[in-house]
């Protein structure tokens, strides 16, 4: 039996690109979709927030107005959401994409009550376009959507790491992995697993977070069963 009834899964845009630096790798997306199907088949109501870093990062713009750059990044998240939806539905998982920026020809607008109803009916809901406003990250979108739909957990799936470390384990081979942390410790230690706005939002709403590696198989499934393979934050 799953430990959690309803979760929000946060996927980075980089995870969608696989070994490529940019764009979409459908083989990787199919693997992600297969993991999502396993937790969906457990009966876990699943909302997904996707990033857009494989297309564009608003904060990295040098010559473009920041607000404009952030909107460009939001459009990238919609492309990722549609690709993931297509993969999930090929696996017979009924999926809805909702966007924080209205584009009714492509997806539903984000409506909280409608999203909750989809989840109750066993549909996977993919939340795209961040929060719909510039200067806010998709990490913040994940924290906000989790609070709005009353999720029991945020699963933060990272590429290249399997939890939270005191330094980058890809650079420092002796980096220490944390088994558990509090949100206040993340802020005090300056650990950049999420931005400060998202961290504070999770802390204020008492939403537990588990950071897992997306490269390993069945990490989402194990986390939903209560078998922690990453770092627990609460």
Image (cartoon, helix red, strand yellow):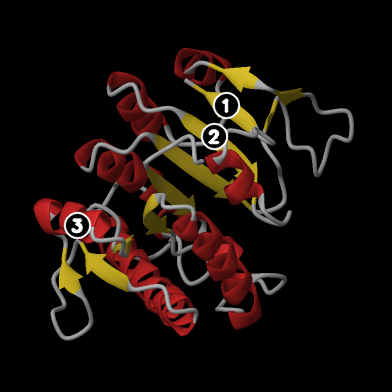
Q: CA distance from mark 1 to mark 3?
A: 26 Å
Q: Earlier in the sequence, mark 1 or mark 3?
A: 3
Mark on residue 132? none
- Residue that protrudes farthest toward the right in the picture: 173
- Please report the residue visible at 34 percent of the width from the left and 32 percent of the height from the top: 197
Q: For this rendering, which residue is in front, 176 or 155?
A: 155
Residue that numbered label 1 is attached to: 232
| Residue 95 at least partly seen | yes
Secondary structure, mark 2, is: strand
- Please report the residue visible at 52 percent of the width from the left and 44 percent of the height from the top: 156
Q: For this rendering, which residue is in front, 63 or 211?
A: 211
| Residue 65 at least partly seen | no
Q: Position of residue 162 (x, y in %)?
A: 70, 42
Q: Position of residue 73 (x, y in %)?
A: 37, 65
Q: Position of residue 139 (x, y in %)?
A: 40, 44
Q: Earlier in the sequence, mark 3 or mark 2?
A: 3
The number of callouts visible is 3
Residue that numbered label 3 is attached to: 115
Q: CA distance from mark 3 to mark 2?
A: 23 Å
- Please report the residue visible at 56 percent of the width from the left and 78 percent of the height from the top: 24
Q: Residues within 10 Å of mark 3 (few under 14, many from 20)?
A: many
Q: Position of residue 54 (x, y in %)?
A: 53, 68
- Please report the residue visible at 44 percent of the width from the left and 35 percent of the height from the top: 195
Q: Evaluate if marks 2 and 1 touch, with contact meaning CB atoms under 8 Å apart.
A: yes
Q: Residues within 10 Å of mark 2 (few under 14, many from 20)?
A: many
Q: CA distance from mark 2 to mark 1?
A: 5 Å
In this view, 47 is above or below 105:
above
Residue that numbered label 2 is attached to: 210
């Amino acid at each position: 039996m799953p430990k959690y009834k309803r979760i929000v899964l946060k996927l980075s845009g980089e995870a969608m690109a696989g070994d490529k630096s940019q764009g979409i790798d459908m083989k990787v997306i199919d693997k992600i979709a297969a993991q999502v199907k396993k937790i969906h088949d457990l009966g876990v109501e699943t909302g997904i927030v996707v990033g857009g870093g494989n297309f564009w990062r608003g904060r990295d713009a040098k010559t473009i107005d920041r607000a404009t750059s952030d909107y460009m990044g939001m459009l990238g998240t919609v492309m990722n959401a549609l690709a993931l939806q297509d993969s999930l539905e090929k696996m017979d998982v009924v999926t809805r994409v909702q966007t924080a920026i209205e584009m009714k020809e492509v997806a539903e607008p984000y409506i909280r009550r409608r999203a909750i109803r989809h989840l109750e009916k066993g549909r996977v809901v993919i939340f795209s376009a961040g929060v719909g406003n510039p200067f806010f990250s998709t990490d913040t979108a994940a924290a906000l959507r989790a609070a709005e739909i009353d999720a029991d957990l945020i699963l933060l799936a990272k590429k290249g790491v399997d939890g939270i470390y005191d330094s980058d384990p890809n650079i420092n081979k002796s980096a220490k992995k944390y088994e558990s942390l509090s949100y206040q410790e993340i802020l005090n230690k300056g650990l950049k697993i999420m931005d400060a706005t998202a961290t504070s939002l999770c802390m204020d709403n008492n939403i537990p977070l588990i950071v897992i590696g997306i490269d390993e198989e069945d990490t989402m499934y194990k986390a939903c069963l209560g078998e922690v393979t990453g770092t627990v934050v609460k």
